[in-house]
């Protein structure tokens, strides 16, 4: 099955539904005989971006880049250390758990492993109905009607209502997870690696379903993945994350046609090219992503970057605009610009 490309998004002239400003999520590291805080894991380290209504913003990065923590922090499942989360023009960063519940109705998460996120003792009908009960939506009859509609919308058989999650395949379980998320009419869906655990053939079916649902329900997606080939078909813009920071941010087209950051270039070089005659040099990075409790000085990517030079060790590059909404955090481009302007 082929993944159909997302149509150009007409809603991109709309206002931002979500804005994240200088967001940091640090986790304390305890140690010593008094179990004191001896450091921090800087999982999300000064991240800013916005997502417009109807847009799909892809976040890509290796495991350990902080992308899942970013999603959880936006949903306020993790407490932000500093920065701002602005949803529908409201600053929700420091709302109490009770106050944040009101916003959770508009923001839902679709998880990587649908089986782990679905209570195995509940039937599918009850699993989809549960969020509506939690948020006090509709009468019992209205909820049952909505469950039946959603089962059909996500392409599950009508008798799924009376079955348990273990009776379904991985792809079908992800459809149950999606129906559950949709049950309370959210505006923003944070999809955390929603197809990573599925076979490639099933991945495309679920991606096509997500794209169709976006058009039908005017949904906004924050789509988290470790693989640029997955986000390519569904995203309007993409942010590439490395060790808690966004190192490149741009429209999908600009990112795939003209990747600027050496990390993005290496991720793209790993995607197989459909044309057997087309050549693409594979850039293999040395080593693993560094420990986030002790990130490298200067540019966080410098220990693996094939282009690193002295300045990279001393100074952290900032995300800088390089035209047409394409931002990159790399000294190569500011130094190049300075050279040209001399
Ligand atoms: Fe590589 Fe230096 Fe650019 Fe970082 S700033 S990506 S180390 S060239």
Image (cartoon, grey):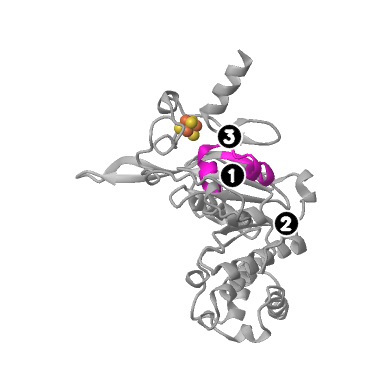
Q: Between 81 and 320, which is closer to the camera in this rendering? A: 320
Q: Can residue 297 be seen?
A: yes
Q: Nearer the viewer, mark 1 or mark 2?
A: 2
What is the tally of numbered marks visible in this picture? Answer: 3
Residue 246 vertical placement versus 190 (above, below): above
| Residue 319, quarter of the rendered image | top right
Q: Which residue is mark 2?
A: 6
Question: Which percent across, then down, holds residue 11?
Answer: 78, 49
* Direction from residue 36 to residue 60 in the image, left or right: right
Q: Quadrant of the N terminus?
A: bottom right
- Ranked by sequence position, the earlier of labels 1 and 2 is 2
Numbered label attached to residue 239: 1
- At 54% from the left and 30% from the top, the residue drawn is 318
Q: Main secondary structure of the magenta part?
A: helix
Question: Which percent across, then down, holds residue 176?
Answer: 60, 73
| Residue density around tag 1, few if under 14, some if 14–19, many if 20 or more, within 10 Å | many
In the displayed image of the protein, which residue is found farthest to the top?
342
SS at badge 3: strand
- Measure the C-alpha gap from mark 1 to mark 2: 17 Å
- Measure the C-alpha gap from mark 3 to mark 2: 24 Å
Q: Between 173 and 302, which is closer to the camera in this rendering? A: 302
Numbered label attached to residue 195: none
Q: Which residue is mark 3?
A: 328
| Residue density around tag 2, few if under 14, some if 14–19, many if 20 or more, within 10 Å | some
């Amino acid at each position: 099955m082929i993944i159909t490309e997302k149509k150009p998004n007409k809603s991109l002239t709309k206002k931002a539904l979500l804005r994240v400003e200088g967001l940091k999520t640090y986790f304390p590291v305890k140690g010593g005989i008094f179990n004191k805080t001896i450091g921090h894991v800087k999982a999300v380290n000064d991240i800013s971006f916005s997502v417009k209504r109807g847009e799909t913003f892809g976040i890509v990065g290796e495991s350990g880049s902080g992308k899942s923590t970013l999603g959880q922090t936006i949903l306020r499942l993790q407490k932000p250390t500093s920065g701002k989360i602005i949803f529908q023009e409201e600053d929700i960063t420091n709302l109490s758990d009770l106050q944040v519940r009101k916003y959770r109705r508009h923001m839902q998460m679709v998880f990587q492993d649908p089986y782990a996120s679905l209570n195995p003792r509940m039937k599918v009908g009850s699993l989809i109905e549960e969020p509506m009960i939690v948020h006090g939506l509709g009468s019992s009859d209205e909820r049952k009607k909505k469950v039946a509609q959603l089962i059909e919308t996500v392409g599950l058989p009508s008798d799924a209502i009376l079955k348990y999650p273990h009776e379904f395949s991985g792809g079908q379980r992800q459809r149950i997870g999606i129906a559950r998320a949709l049950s309370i009419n959210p505006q923003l869906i944070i999809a955390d690696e929603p197809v990573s655990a599925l076979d490639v053939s099933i991945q495309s079916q679920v991606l096509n379903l997500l794209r169709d649902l976006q058009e039908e329900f005017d949904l906004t997606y924050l789509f988290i993945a470790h693989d640029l080939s997955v986000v390519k078909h569904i995203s309007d813009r993409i942010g590439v994350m490395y060790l808690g920071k966004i190192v490149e941010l741009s429209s999908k087209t600009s990112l795939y046609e003209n990747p600027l950051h050496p990390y993005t270039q290496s991720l793209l070089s790993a995607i197989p090219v459909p044309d057997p005659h087309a050549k693409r040099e594979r850039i293999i990075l040395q080593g693993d992503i560094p420990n986030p409790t002790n990130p490298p000085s200067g540019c966080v990517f410098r220990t693996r970057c094939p282009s690193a030079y002295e300045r990279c060790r001393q100074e952290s590059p900032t995300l800088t605009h390089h035209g047409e909404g394409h931002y990159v955090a790399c000294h190569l481009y500011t130094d190049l610009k300075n050279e040209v302007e001399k």
